[in-house]
Image (cartoon, rainbow, N blue to C red):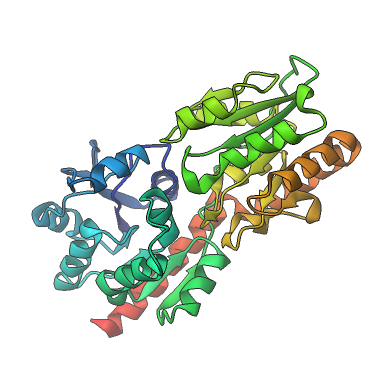
Amino acid sequence: MTIVIVVDCFNDKSNGTAVSANNLAQNLESKGHIVRVVAPHINGENKFNVRERWIPLVTYIAHNQHMHFGKADKKILRDAFSGADIIHFFLPFKLEIVGVKIAKEMKIPYIGAFHLQPEHISYNGNLRWIPKIDDLVLWLFKYRFYNAIYHIHCPSRLISEELLKNDFKQKLAVISNGFNASFKPIAVPRQDDLFHIVMTGRYSKEKRQDVLIKAIKQSKYEKNIKLHLKGQGPMDNCYKKMAKDLSNEVDFGFVSKDDLAKLYSQMDIYVHTADIDGEAISALEAIACGIVPIIADSPLSATKQFALDERSVFKSGDSKDLAKKIDYFIEHKDELESLKTRYEKSAKDYDLSICVDKMIDFYKEAIEDFKQIY
């Protein structure tokens, strides 16, 4: 098949949607499919570069979150769509909205995806104070984009349940974004006797890394904990100030995909504090490397689905409860070791290759359905 991916952010590997789009594109190509990508700031074979769309104030906030908006260039979209079997729209913005209209004109099948929760916008735009703001954002997404979509990819069961609750009538396919097979345990010698905790992801309000820093301060074993808080984002300076008085210097900064598996293999636990997550691939990658997670039980985060029992779940936003969970594993390292193998095995259900096969089946289903739609 010739598949077109339309996404506003493709090159920035610190953006979860961009990482998912890249993983999908590479895996589809490895299975023999032709993949074209329409996005800003890209170049190369089968890459259709559109200019970045500048929106006053919004673009500034988006850049802080490592997000871009693509300009809806109709000529480039038509060129990319020509001869395609199906088009995969990732986000509900102008580039995709115009792209759907052109796909209809050209009578090419397409699907949409639901990667962006309304709460991502309200948190990062400092709009939480506005009553019903998340309902309004979801209504706008639905009115401007999803009403024209017949098939929606949901990266988790939580997303599909939210859409059903909000009266989405489309065909919904729950398919994990999956993790790359390169994430597996690596034998790396330990350099010290400290208890190493890692969390990776954007430094942004909804990720709640502040809860983890506070929890370590409240731990009985604070002097023996080394925190690795890997990422980048607008809360960088804030978190560095918060972490200044920890006994062991925090390991901040972005880490490349190639170095992540090695880093994970040196850790004792992975902590995921986010209030909002459609599916955290970073947590999956860590689990695949044999790290036991502790995950926030937020009702807006699907990541808690990866927890095997209550030892790996803490009350969302509650640093004291997280500190208790951390202390438990420090005191029961024998349980930690036995759980590592169980978690590594549990990740196999989310292998990227398996997930992409499911996506291909969804594409074929949509193509068949569009024979009636068109």
Task: Give the side of residue 305 with respect to residue 19, left or right.
Answer: right
Task: Give the side of residue 262 with respect to residue 150, left or right.
Answer: right
Q: Quadrant of residue 354?
A: bottom right
Residue 81 position, x and y percent, is 20, 59
Residue 309 position, x and y percent, is 79, 56
The residue positioned 34% from the left and 38% from the top of the image is 64
The residue positioned 35% from the left and 57% from the top of the image is 90
Q: Quadrant of the C terminus?
A: bottom left
Q: Quadrant of residue 186?
A: top right
The residue positioned 45% from the left and 45% from the top of the image is 16
Question: Total of numbered circles in the picture?
Answer: 0
Task: Give the side of residue 81 with respect to residue 239, left or right.
Answer: left
Q: Is 139 in front, or is 305?
A: 139
Vertical relation: 228 (above or below) 42: above
- The answer to whether residue 88 of the structure is visible from this angle is yes
Vertical relation: 315 (above or below) 204: below
- The answer to whether residue 46 of the structure is visible from this angle is no
Q: Residue furthest left?
A: 75
Q: Quadrant of the N terminus?
A: bottom left
Q: Residue furthest top?
A: 191
Q: Is 212 in front, or is 267?
A: 212
Task: Give the side of residue 64 with respect to residue 48, left or right.
Answer: right
Residue 170 position, x and y percent, is 40, 79
Residue 23 position, x and y percent, is 44, 45
Vertical relation: 167 (above or below) 366: below
